[in-house]
Amino acid sequence: MEVIPISPRGYCYGVVDAMTLVRRIAADPDIPRPIHVLGMLVHNRQVTEAFAAIGVICLDEPGATRVELLEKVESGTVVFTAHGISPEVRLKALQRGLHIEDATCPDVARTHQLIEHHVEEGGFVVYVGISGHPEPEGACGVAPGAVHLVSCLDDVDRLPAFDAPLLVTNQTTMSQWDIKPIIAAIRDRFPTAMVQTEICLATQVRQEAVADQAGSADLLVVVGDARSNNSQRLAAVGTEIAGVPVMQVASVADIDTSRLPISGRIAVTSGASTPTAVTREVISYLKRYDGRQHPPETSIAVGNRVLPSLPRKRGGGQTT
Ligand code: SF4
């Protein structure tokens, strides 16, 4: 089997920085215990289990907001994830006397500042993002009532009339191809709206790599958790832009061998929060696949193997 590892792929700088911060505080005896992460630091079970092994509890409950998760933290330290947090959650954590560690990605923080500044000037914001995802929750929470979340074209029709300048921006992990028709529809309704797209560099280069490099493959395998928005977007770029069938797997154990070509080319990419070791195992299995063997249960041991120790260059990816 010929495997095409798409480059760049995998961990982004925001996720690496967040994990490095958590590793550092977990090793620091002066940081108040217990240490809770508000949400999953990344959407990846192996990483969550690796952190549990060093005493860091990632709070996660499908559908729960950050405010609701915070209710479960009574003392010690709370870590805000790279997705960013609303001012309400920060204030509540301070009121409860919690020690705060903030791993908000600088790219997400910049979008928050953009929203804050525009609303302070008296304007409204339309934010294009995924409903229920933590990043839009934090961004819309920057100015409740002044920021309107739009997830699809129907949402554009439901927007109210605005009597002040309108700014349009978006979730950092969206794809340029997803937001284009939505932003066009917003411009149709609000011709004077200012548009500032905020897709982060890491997301953009990974999506463009899929669009450029996956087209000649018979199948694209996206290694990434089903709840990871950037992994879902990579899969969408594979299907809609590169025009290849896509299989998204969280680990090697998820590979559906009935969909693998016996011979041919398989392109592989991975989400910004997918551990390098998990992707490496998938690539290794696919290279050895001869049409007979079943995928193994993942052999990735939880622990330091899935936790990076050094930040990577901005915009770059893992090449393994
Ligand atoms: S995907 Fe982009 S915005 Fe999100 S953490 Fe990574 S670098 Fe930051």
Image: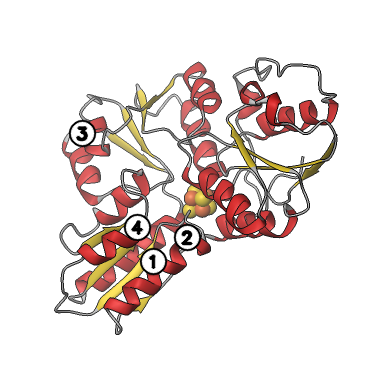
Amino acid type, callout 2: Asp
Is the C-beta of the residue carrying label 1 under 8 Å from the nearest atom of ligand 1? no
How is colour applied across the structure in the image? secondary structure
Element assignment for label 1 = helix
Q: How many residues crowd around disc 2 within 10 Å: few (fewer than 14), some, or many (20 or more)?
A: some
Q: Would you name the residue on which mark 3 appears?
A: 97
The first of marks 3 and 2 along the sequence is 3
Three-letter code for the amino acid on which mark 3 is drawn: Gly
Residue 182 is labelled as 1
Q: CA distance from mark 2 to mark 4?
A: 9 Å
Q: Is 282 on the left or on the right of 205, as rendered?
A: right
Q: Does the CB distance between marks 4 and 1 fall below 8 Å?
A: yes
State the quadrant of the N terminus. top right
Query: In the image, residue 125 lies at what x, y percent?
Result: 26, 68
Q: Residues within 10 Å of mark 1 (few under 14, many from 20)?
A: some
Query: Which residue bears the numbered disc 2?
Result: 178
Q: Which residue is mark 4?
A: 152
Choose the circle earlier in sequence order: 2 or 4: 4
Residue nearest the viewer, comparing 42 with 7:
7
Q: Position of residue 27 (x, y in %)?
A: 51, 26
**Between 318 and 161, the one nearer to me in the picture:** 161
- Picture coordinates of residue 238 (x, y %)? 63, 51
Disc 1 residue type?
Answer: Ile
Q: Residue at x 49, y 41 (%)?
A: 18
- Amino acid type for the residue under numbered disc 4: Cys
* Local secondary structure at mark 3: loop
Question: For the residues marked 3 and 4, what is the alpha-carbon distance in whole angstroms?
Answer: 39 Å
Give the Cα distance between marks 3 and 2: 41 Å
